[in-house]
C-alpha cells in the first residue's frame, strides 16, 4: 500500500467514485468530485511499472517542472511506496501538493520528511511556508526558527521575518 492510501486518501478514480457514491446527498454524482481524470503518459506508465524509487522520484521531479502535477503526484507516490524512508520523496511530494493547493496534505508530507531527516533545514523551511499560507503564523515562526538554528549562515533563513502578526 502507498503512503497516501495508508493515510486514508483516495488514490484512484475508482476510490474517489466509491467515496462519492457513498455520500448521503443523492444529488451529488461521483464525477463532480473528480476534478479531472488522471491521464498518465506512456513515459510515466513505463517508469511506474519498471522503475526503482530513484526513477520514480526523478520522473516526479521532471513532471513537476513541466507542470504535470497530477502525473508528478503519481510518480512521487510510487517512489514513496518503493522506498518509504527516503525523505526527499516526501519533500518533493509536498511541493507538488502545495502547487495543487492542497496545503494540509503538503504539510503532512513535509512533516514526514522532517521525521525522517530532522536536521535538514529546507524541510522545516518548506513546512513553515505552508503553515504561513494557512495562517498558522505562530507555528510557522517556530518551524522557521528551527530552520535558522540548523543553518544559521544561510541568508534566506536570516531574512525570515519572525515578527509578523
Image: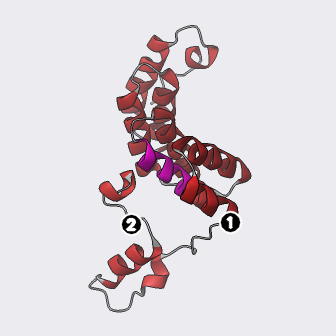
Q: Earlier in the sequence, mark 1 or mark 2?
A: 2
Residue 84 position, x and y percent, is 39, 41
Q: Quadrant for residue 29, please give it.
A: bottom left
Q: Residues within 10 Å of mark 1 (few under 14, many from 20)?
A: few
Callout in the foreground (1, 2): 1
Nearer to me, 84 or 161 = 84
Residue occupying image coordinates x 63% and y 14%:
155
Q: For the stretch drawn in magenta, what is the main secondary structure?
A: helix
Judge from the rendering whether residue 7 lies leftward or rightward of residue 56; answer left or right. left
Q: Is residue 92 magenta?
A: no
Residue occupying image coordinates x 45% and y 27%:
124
Q: CA distance from mark 1 to mark 2?
A: 23 Å
Looking at the rendered structure, the secondary structure element under dot 1 is: helix
Residue occupying image coordinates x 47% and y 41%:
90
Residue 61 position, x and y percent, is 64, 44
Is 88 drawn above or below residue 9 in the view shown?
above
| Region in magenta | 73-83
Judge from the rendering whether residue 35 lies leftward or rightward of residue 135; answer left or right. right
Is 72 drawn above or below residue 39 in the view shown?
above
Please say whether residue 100 is visible from this viewpoint: no
Q: Which mark is residue 10?
A: 2
Residue 7 position, x and y percent, is 31, 54
The residue under label 1 is: 42
Q: Is residue 77 magenta?
A: yes
Nearer to me, 158 or 47 = 47
Question: For the N terminus, which image quadrant?
Answer: bottom left
Nearer to me, 15 or 140 = 15
Amino acid at each position: 500500500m502507498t503512503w497516501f492510501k495508508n493515510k486514508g486518501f483516495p488514490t484512484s478514480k475508482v476510490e474517489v467514485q466509491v467515496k462519492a457514491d457513498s455520500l448521503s446527498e443523492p444529488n451529488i454524482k461521483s464525477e463532480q468530485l473528480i476534478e479531472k481524470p488522471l491521464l498518465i503518459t506512456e513515459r510515466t506508465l513505463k517508469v511506474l511499472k519498471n522503475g526503482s524509487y530513484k526513477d520514480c522520484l526523478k520522473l516526479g521531479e521532471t513532471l513537476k517542472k513541466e507542470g504535470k502535477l497530477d502525473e508528478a503526484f503519481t510518480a512521487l507516490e510510487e517512489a514513496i511506496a518503493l522506498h518509504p524512508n527516503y525523505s526527499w520523496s516526501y519533500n518533493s511530494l509536498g511541493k507538488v501538493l502545495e502547487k495543487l493547493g492542497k496545503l494540509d496534505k503538503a504539510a503532512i508530507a513535509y512533516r514526514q520528511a522532517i521525521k525522517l531527516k530532522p536536521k535538514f533545514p529546507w524541510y522545516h523551511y518548506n513546512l513553515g511556508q505552508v503553515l504561513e499560507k494557512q495562517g498558522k503564523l505562530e507555528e510557522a515562526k517556530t518551524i522557521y526558527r528551527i530552520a535558522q538554528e540548523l543553518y544559521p549562515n544561510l541568508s534566506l533563513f536570516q531574512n525570515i521575518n519572525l515578527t509578523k502578526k
